[in-house]
Amino acid sequence: MAGEDAFDARAYTREMRKLWSAAAPHFEAVSSGYFGPATHPFFAFAGLSPGQRVLDVACGPGTSARLAFESVRPRGEVLGVDISLAMLVLARRGAGGPRFAAMDAEALALPDASFDAVLCHLGLMLFARPRAALSEMARVLRPGGTLACLVLGSAGRMAFTSLLTTILPRHAPEMRPGRGPGLADFANPRRLEGALKAAGLREVSSRRLRGTFAVASKDRYWDIALKAFGRIGPVLKRLSPGVRGQVKDELFARLSAYEQGGRLALPYEFVMARGVKPGAA
Ligand SMILES: C[S@@+](CC[C@H](N)C(=O)[O-])C[C@H]1O[C@@H](n2cnc3c(N)ncnc32)[C@H](O)[C@@H]1O
């Protein structure tokens, strides 16, 4: 991917670890409160079945790992991995269910061919080197096993996340395109399929999911952006109060286009792809 070698991938991943740890206490409300309409079709698409060993890469607060566990129990196993220790503390609440471990998606400390299915729910487009992560995911998959990824869709259709990512580059140089991975890097289904094929997967297919998220108010949206949107919140907080106020005014003006009956109806688009590792099952 363009720019993948042109920036410091290690430093980027260290920064991601910090940013997502800061977002952790607020992220679960977003993950389970808003992303459900994408999560459920994603699980149907991934096609887990009872008894499978499943790896959930970039598991965050454990929402997707717990859902995976419901599909594979009682004999199946789920391991959720993430770089953020704060996310893993949240994921580990409650007895039983999935296990969790700290791990970088680009260097999985796991044996070859040790999982029947690998999932990556809203992680791939955030990794410093997503193609390295995909080849790790394919490595730990057994022949005949399935890898499924869910990513954010195109900026034009994913208003929920892109409203700020289109305003911020004018005010925050670190948000300019070409400074590392972009949230919409895999929004084109063909591109996502191509990345899975390049990782050695076959029978690759993809789907788009479109709809709207209902958000209570503009202030609620601003609060989510400040606390739970990964790198966006810290970038907003680093701006001078005057510039942050300008960004907020511009955002609120744009949000007016999505007001419906006192609430916001924010369009979303997600893209998911799956593929099978060749070889004897
Ligand atoms: C948008 S959240 C998604 C979390 C979870 N899958 C969900 O949907 O609720 C992205 C997660 O990716 C994790 N992450 C970012 N870079 C990572 C990497 N290189 N390896 C493992 N996890 C990473 C973050 O710590 C964060 O928990």
Image: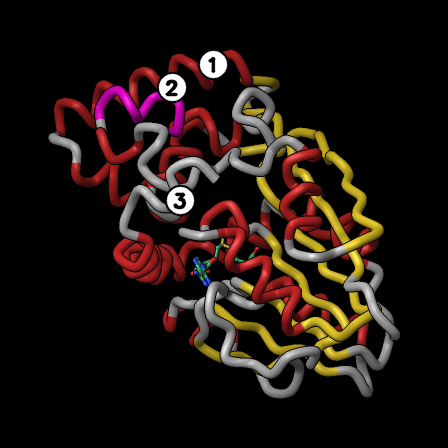
Q: For the residues marked 3 and 2, what is the alpha-carbon distance in whole angstroms?
A: 33 Å
Secondary structure mainly formed by the magenta segment? helix
Q: Secondary structure at mark 2?
A: helix
Q: Amino acid under label 2?
A: Phe
| Disc with the residue nearer the chain's start (3 vs 2) | 3
Q: Earlier in the sequence, mark 3 or mark 1?
A: 3
Label 3: which residue? 4
Residue at the (80%, 53%) spot, across then down: 202
Q: Quadrant of the C terminus?
A: bottom right
C-alpha separation, residue under disc 2 versus residue under disc 1: 6 Å
Residue 153 percent across, percent down from the top left: 60, 33
Q: Nearer the viewer, residue 172 or 214?
A: 172
**Residue 51's x, y, as percent?**
84, 81
| Circle 3: element type | loop
In the foreground, 53 or 202: 202
State which region is magenta: 165-171
Q: Secondary structure at mark 1?
A: helix
Is 246 within the magenta?
no
Q: Position of residue 125 (x, y in %)?
A: 51, 45
Badge 1 is on which residue?
256
Q: Is residue 168 magenta?
A: yes
The answer for how far apart the CA atoms under marks 3 and 1 are is: 36 Å
The residue that mark 2 highlights is 252
Whether pointer 2 and pointer 1 mark residues with C-beta atoms closer than 8 Å, the reply is yes
